[in-house]
Image (cartoon, grey):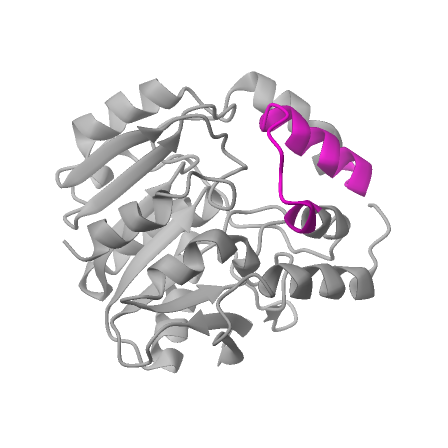
């Protein structure tokens, strides 16, 4: 395990959060699984939009490039996953261990926020979590957008796992940077966001909830409007294979490929029009 500097992480987190809209507020929602940190912006009386970040070093801060657009007509509620890097904190050993636990956690979170039903968006692991929640709590999800989800429509490429292995076995800032530079193909990354990923190395995380890919028969029953946007340069999986497979099983989906962007560059380094694309879907 790499050396973790909590102070450096907090400084890096705050620097990325400074890129959010100025009216942002932060608060904590207690649940049986721990305290969930929420970064919120947008009109308080607007329809809610719950955002789930990717895994690894991703946090709610990673939505900074899309938050202003999304907050025009939505109350944006972006969360730090319990047990992952960020400002949420598990309740001792009582952190989510199963998909059922994740569903119970999100139910408790929405209850604590006073939200009955919500639009839901996620990136990568957050999109996988969002799909499971929409399948298990369909009455609480109005619309669902997924940015390059993992383990939903295809498995990981072997090359991706091999490149990630050194970082997973012993996370250090240097290994995190090397992996992200490989996956993003040398695309310039926001230095503050990259610094946040580096300082998350060695964060005292708990084991994330993982499981098999979502079964096609389950996906055929996902009866909510879905916008699935895939990274054209993703090294995580076969982008066009995922697009074809998802289009064949999702009953109410719009599937598209975002060109010239990789998996880990979403959503923070995506084309400027991504926010408008998401708001157009949410307002349809």
Q: Is residue 200 above or below residue 272?
A: below
Camera-side residue of 210 and 5: 5
Residue 272 highlighted magenta (yes or no): no
Residue, x 30% and y 49% (percent of image)? 276
Q: Position of residue 216 (x, y in %)?
A: 24, 32
Count of labels shown? 0
In the rendered structure, the answer to whether residue 34 lies left or right of residue 149 reads right
Residue, x 50% and y 30% (percent of image)? 262
Camera-side residue of 72 and 175: 72
> Is residue 33 shown to the viewer in this render?
no
Q: Is residue 106 above or below residue 169?
A: below
Q: Quadrant of the N terminus?
A: top right
Q: Position of residue 20 (x, y in %)?
A: 52, 64
In the rendered structure, the answer to whether residue 73 lies left or right of residue 94 reads left
Q: Is residue 245 above or below residue 124?
A: above
Q: Position of residue 158 (x, y in %)?
A: 56, 18
Q: Quadrant of residue 228?
A: top left
Residue, x 57% and y 61% (percent of image)? 19
In the rendered structure, the answer to whether residue 75 lies left or right of residue 54 reads left
Report the span colored magenta.
169-194
Residue, x 33% and y 77% (percent of image)? 43
Residue 177 highlighted magenta (yes or no): yes
Q: Quadrant of residue 133?
A: bottom left
> Is residue 139 shown to the viewer in this render?
yes
Q: Position of residue 261 (x, y in %)?
A: 47, 30
Q: Is residue 108 above or below residue 4?
A: below
């Amino acid at each position: 395990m790499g050396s973790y500097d909590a102070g450096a992480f907090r400084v890096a987190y705050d620097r990325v959060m400074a890129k959010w809209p100025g009216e942002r507020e932060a608060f904590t929602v207690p649940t049986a699984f721990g305290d969930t940190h929420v970064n919120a912006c947008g009109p308080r009386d607007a329809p809610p939009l719950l955002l789930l970040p990717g895994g690894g070093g991703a946090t709610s801060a990673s939505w900074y490039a899309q938050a202003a657009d999304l907050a025009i007509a939505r109350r944006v509620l972006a969360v730090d996953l319990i047990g992952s890097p960020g400002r949420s904190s598990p309740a001792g050993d009582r952190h989510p261990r199963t998909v059922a636990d994740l569903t119970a956690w999100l139910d408790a979170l929405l209850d604590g926020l006073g939200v009955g039903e919500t639009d839901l968006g996620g990136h990568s692991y957050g999109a996988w979590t969002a799909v499971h929640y929409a399948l298990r709590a369909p009455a609480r999800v109005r619309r669902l957008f997924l940015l390059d989800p993992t383990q939903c429509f295809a498995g990981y490429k072997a090359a991706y796992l091999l490149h990630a292995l050194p970082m997973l076995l012993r996370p250090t800032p240097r290994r995190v940077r090397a992996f992200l530079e490989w996956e993003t193909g040398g695309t310039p990354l926001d230095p503050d966001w990259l610094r946040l990923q580096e300082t998350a190395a060695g964060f005292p995380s708990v084991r994330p909830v993982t499981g098999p890919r979502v079964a096609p028969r389950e996906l055929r029953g996902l009866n909510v409007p879905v916008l699935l946007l895939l990274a054209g340069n993703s090294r995580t999986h076969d982008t066009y294979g995922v697009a074809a497979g998802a289009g064949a099983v999702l009953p109410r989906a719009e599937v598209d490929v975002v060109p010239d962007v990789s998996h880990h560059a979403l959503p923070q380094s995506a084309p400027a029009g991504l926010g408008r694309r998401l708001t157009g879907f949410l307002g349809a």
